[in-house]
């Protein structure tokens, strides 16, 4: 079977590894001259990372205990889930080398400019035939546009800073509308932190000053767009989408790697019948409609209500997600008339604990 994957980022490479695991040898086309890392927090939960048929351990920068949620009033709560930050650039290169060692082909400087029913044309003028075409070409996906799919986006900006991370055991998320309409984050690596925000660099600079990090040396600046549309069409005839091209990032956390990992398994299993791929992905927790309901709830809530919602659902120190019992709700009067909202947010947070990074 001739399977062509467009894009050599995480979605394309993880898909290729799963296809090889199923005995299918793909060709990967990458328009850039090198395989490189785009803007990303570089975090993943360890359980999901180990689902990839590839040894990622050499590329782990730091293991953390889970997620720390920090609120406007200075309080915080925890979600315990063994997670890691990755040396993403070298991790991608390592997966690419593994794919080639196992017989897969990766072609750089290979930009797709036209798609027909069973062939594609490259910018070089070359034409390639395919039986299955997989669009893994990121947020600004040519393949998705060809299928008539348009996504909405949010801008994300990030700095890598030299910083002592010896006492940092959690991925930190900050919920503060004074800083961002979404959230901000600090992810520890080994002597480096990834500091980012849903917003532009001007907003990120404000966050740095707020955290007292503006004197730290910036070693890299990155920005990108995160698709925030609900998952729409994933398949048309013999073409499938995965990753950012399919708007798969978790709508609560913005994390895109874990959804890719599970979608790639499903895609490899159903590559000969793509309708089953779309059907199974849409039934999977990574595409649960409750995630979007919870996103809209949080975006439409005041800072005070966000604190109440998340505090009601998480235990401050034990790191567990808890069902919103009546006793707990009574502690947060503003939630007493929002029980359905609370339940949907509870369900979304539980899903995000496993599939959100």
Image (spheres, rainbow, N blue to C red):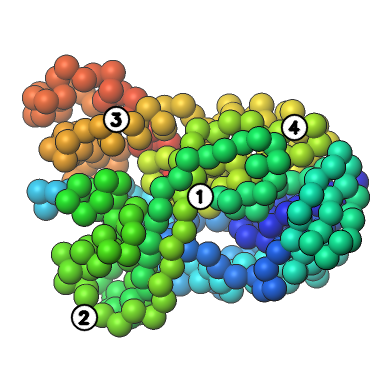
Q: Residue at x 28, y 35 (%)?
A: 298
Instruction: Give the number of the disc on residue 236.
Output: 4
Mark 1 and mark 2: Cα distance apart in space: 30 Å
Location of residue 277 in the rendering, given as x and y in whole percent from the top left corner: 70, 33
Residue found 57% across the figure and 38% down from its top: 150
Which residue position is annotated with label 2? 215
Q: Answer with mark 3 or mark 1, whichever residue precedes in sequence.
A: 1
Q: Earlier in the sequence, mark 3 or mark 2?
A: 2
Q: Is residue 28 left or right of residue 14?
A: right
Residues packed near mark 4 inside 10 Å, few (<14), some (14 to 19) or many (20 plus)? few
Read off the residue under disc 3.
297
Q: In terms of image quadrants, where is residue 31?
A: bottom right
Q: Separation of disc 3 and disc 1 at Cα?
A: 21 Å
Residue matched to label 1:
256
- Closer to the camera: disc 1 or disc 2? 2
Would you call the spot at circle 1 few (<14 residues within 10 Å), some (14-19), or many (20 or more)? Answer: many
Q: Position of residue 215 (x, y in %)?
A: 21, 80
Chain-order first, disc 2 or disc 4 = 2
| Contact between labelled residues 2 and 1, with CB atoms less than 8 Å apart | no
The foreground one among 331 and 129 is 129
Q: From this viewpoint, is residue 247 visible?
A: yes
């Amino acid at each position: 079977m001739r399977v062509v994957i467009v894009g050599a980022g995480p979605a394309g490479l993880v898909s290729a590894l799963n296809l090889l695991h199923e005995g299918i040898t793909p060709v990967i086309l990458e328009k850039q001259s090198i395989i490189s890392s785009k803007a990303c927090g570089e975090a993943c939960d360890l359980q999901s990372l180990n689902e990839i048929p590839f040894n990622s351990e050499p590329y782990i920068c730091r293991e953390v205990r889970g997620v720390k949620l920090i609120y406007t009033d200075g309080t915080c709560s925890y979600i315990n889930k063994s997670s890691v930050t990755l040396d993403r650039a070298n991790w991608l290169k390592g997966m690419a080398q593994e794919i080639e060692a196992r017989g897969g082909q990766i072609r750089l400087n290979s930009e797709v400019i036209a798609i027909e029913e069973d062939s594609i044309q490259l910018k070089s003028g070359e034409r390639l035939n395919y039986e299955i075409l997989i669009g893994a070409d990121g947020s600004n996906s040519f393949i998705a546009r060809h299928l008539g799919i348009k996504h909405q986006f949010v801008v994300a900006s990030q700095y890598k800073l030299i910083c002592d991370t010896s006492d940092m055991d959690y991925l930190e998320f900050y919920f503060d509308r004074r800083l961002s309409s979404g959230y901000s984050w600090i992810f520890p690596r080994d002597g480096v932190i990834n500091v980012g925000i849903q917003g532009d660099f001007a907003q990120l600079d404000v966050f740095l000053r707020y955290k007292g990090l503006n004197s730290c040396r910036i070693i890299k600046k990155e920005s990108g767009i995160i698709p925030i549309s609900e998952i729409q069409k994933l398949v048309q005839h013999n073409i499938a989408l995965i990753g950012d091209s399919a708007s798969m990032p978790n709508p609560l956390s913005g994390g895109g790697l874990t959804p890719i990992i599970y979608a790639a398994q499903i895609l490899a299993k159903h590559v000969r019948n793509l309708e089953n791929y779309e059907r199974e992905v849409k039934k999977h927790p990574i595409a649960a409609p409750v995630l979007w309901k919870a996103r809209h709830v949080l975006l439409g809530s005041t800072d005070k209500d966000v604190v109440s919602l998340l505090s009601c659902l998480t235990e401050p120190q034990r790191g567990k997600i808890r069902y919103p019992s009546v006793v707990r709700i009574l502690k947060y009067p503003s939630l007493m008339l929002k029980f359905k909202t609370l339940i949907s947010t509870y369900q979304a947070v539980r899903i995000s604990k496993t599939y959100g990074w």
